[in-house]
Amino acid sequence: MLQTLGVEIDEDFLKLLLFSNESFDKYAKKKVLTAKTVIDSRVTDNRSFIYIEKGLTKIVASHNAKETTVSFSGDGEFIGFASLLSKENNQYEMETISETTAYFIDPYFVLNVIDASGWGTSILLKFIDNLTQSANYYGKLNLLRAKEKIAASLLHLESKKQGESEGYLPKEICHYDLASYCQITREYTTKMLSQFEEEGSLN
């Protein structure tokens, strides 16, 4: 978390800036999406900046006809930081895992609000830091052995669900999602989850 003059620059700070702006309703669309809804960045509103009010989603990237789950996002998180830092269209799909309430926000509005806030440099540095941490985490994850990938992923998901016990797997996330995220087979994922349950390390 980045601090500037005692102010914490985080997603809550950005939410406050955006939602308190008098033009927010003009540039943001609130949608309630059923589970399994797919938002394709290549064909629909491809430069939206998204705020997840409630629910659980995954981001799926495609490369050489192969789809890989690259991240999970839930309550109080933003999706689309890269779209604010680049004019290129991002090639990804967002799929809701549970029913999700989300705000689709015009990225140009977001950038204008950030610029007018006086905290523009600090906020953009935070965006870059978030993207770098995500890339570093995913890079390190891929260096682990399959069993270690699953364990690390469970801890990562648990960190998104405060108050839950270590090793918690959100019930909406199926074995396929976890296998895709770890880039291993679903069969091996199921085997390891069963082993973790037997060991008492997974609830």
Image (cartoon, rainbow, N blue to C red):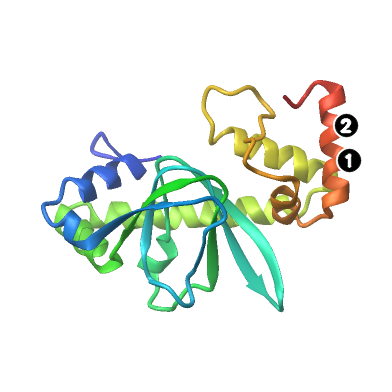
User: Residue at horizontal 54%, vertical 45%?
Assistant: 98
The residue to which callout 1 is attached is 191
- Decide: marks 2, 1 in contact (CB < 8 A)? yes
In percent of width and height, residue 183 lies at: 76, 57
Q: Quick one: quadrant of the N terminus?
A: top left
| Residue drawn at the location 54% of the way across and 66% of the way down | 93
Q: CA distance from mark 2 to mark 1?
A: 6 Å
Q: Helix, strand or loop at disc 2?
A: helix
Q: Nearer the viewer, residue 167 or 53?
A: 53
Camera-nearest residue between 45 and 140: 45
Tell me residue 161's x, y (percent). Answer: 54, 31
In front: 80, or 23? 23
Residue 5 screen position, x and y as percent: 23, 38
Percent x, y of residue 71: 58, 53
Hey, what amino acid is under mark 2?
Gln
* Residue receiving disc 2: 195
Please tell me how crowded label 1 is: few (under 14), some (14-19), or many (20+) other residues with Cα within 10 Å. Answer: few
Quick one: 95 or 163, which is closer to the camera?
95
Does the image show residue 10?
Answer: no
- Residue 20: image tag: none
Q: What residue is at 40 percent from the left and 73 percent from the top?
A: 86
